[in-house]
Image (cartoon, helix red, strand yellow):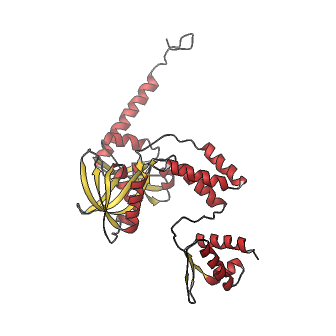
Amino acid sequence: MLDTSARLLRLLGLLQSRRFWPGAELAARLGVTPRTVRRDIDRLRSLGYPVRASAGPAGGYALAAGAALPPLLLDDDEALAVALGLRLATMTAVTGLEDAGLRALAKLEQVLPTRLRRRVRGLHAAMVPLGMVGPAVDAERLSALAGACRDRVRAAFAYRGNDGRRSERDVEPHALVCSAARWYLLAWDCGRGDWRTFRVDRIGGRLQSGPRFLPRPIPDGDAAAYVSRAVGSDPYAVRARVVLHAPLARMAERIPPLAGRLTALADDRCLLETGAQAVGMLAVWIAGLGVEFEVLAPQELAGSLEDVAARLQRAAGRSTAASPLPIASDGLAG
């Protein structure tokens, strides 16, 4: 049997691992009697941990939120995951978290066992930021929007559109989606009576909270897929649907979510929904994917592909027929 101090740490770790524990299950995990569990719970409460208890045959214990953040007990994998997440927080496009992330990382590394400290430092030494890919997003605004999504509270804010025009929006926030260092808010726009996708970096001013709302079913039940379609094809003058003769997993490695939406059709085929401002640009991009494909829509895309194919064939013929350039004696073309 564990001594009292070790048992308390073990009990605290169990309470932090899930929301609710039946008293009998805790006793079995710790190898003690239910009466000993009750005494240990009282000891945790005396140390400031807010543990709630419920009576009856289905009764048990739950660690509630308190006035201060209690010490967390992490296993090796959890500690590595937290350390990696903190390092990434200092390298992303979310502003306002850099200093806090470094302070938290320093505290964590200070108490890590030597074996884990070496692994964490090795990870950090190998991680080099390439630079900001997207616009910076304020951490407080991101947190406020996440809270509105969680609590189902309407939000009002000023928004700057693609054309630079500002408008006032009153929305029902449903989800935050991050892709390619850009953050998007998926919300029901109360003024326009439809779903809208908002870039978080274009949300300005103070976020005003409104009344609570009942959540609406997200189209197709997938917030990420909706944002991918809204950003990857809907805003463009030319929107295309193309069957790619390749597995979805293979094409997902080549096509980022913001470039188009992929849907599996079979083990060796997938549907690409994408868009561009000009049909010629779209034809060249699709041809460059390096797989067999067929165009479902629009018809203009098929015609543009024929033009591209003809130009490439002519260019290949000229390249083959052309005589090589003379080489000067110093190895440079004369």
Label total for image: 0
Residue 143 sits above or below residue 277 on the image: below
Q: Tell whether 202 sits left or right of 98.
A: left
Q: Tell whether 271 sits left or right of 158.
A: right
Residue positioned most to the right = 1
Residue positioned most to the top = 329
Position in image of residue 19 (x %, y %): 54, 74
Query: Which quadrant is the N terminus positioned in?
Result: bottom right
Snapshot quadrant of residue 3: bottom right
Position in image of residue 280 (x %, y %): 32, 39
Nearer to the camera, 171 or 234: 171
Nearer to the camera, 30 or 258: 30
Nearer to the camera, 116 or 98: 98
Evaluate whether residue 315 shows in this view.
Answer: yes
Residue at screen point 65% across, 47% down: 121
Residue positioned most to the bottom = 57
Residue 330 sits above or below residue 256 on the image: above
Position in image of residue 274 (x %, y %): 36, 50
Position in image of residue 254 (x %, y %): 48, 47
Snapshot quadrant of residue 210: bottom left
Residue at screen point 39% across, 66% down: 221
Residue at screen point 59% across, 75% down: 45
Residue 243 sits above or below residue 54 on the image: above
Residue at screen point 36% across, 33% down: 311
Residue positioned most to the front = 46
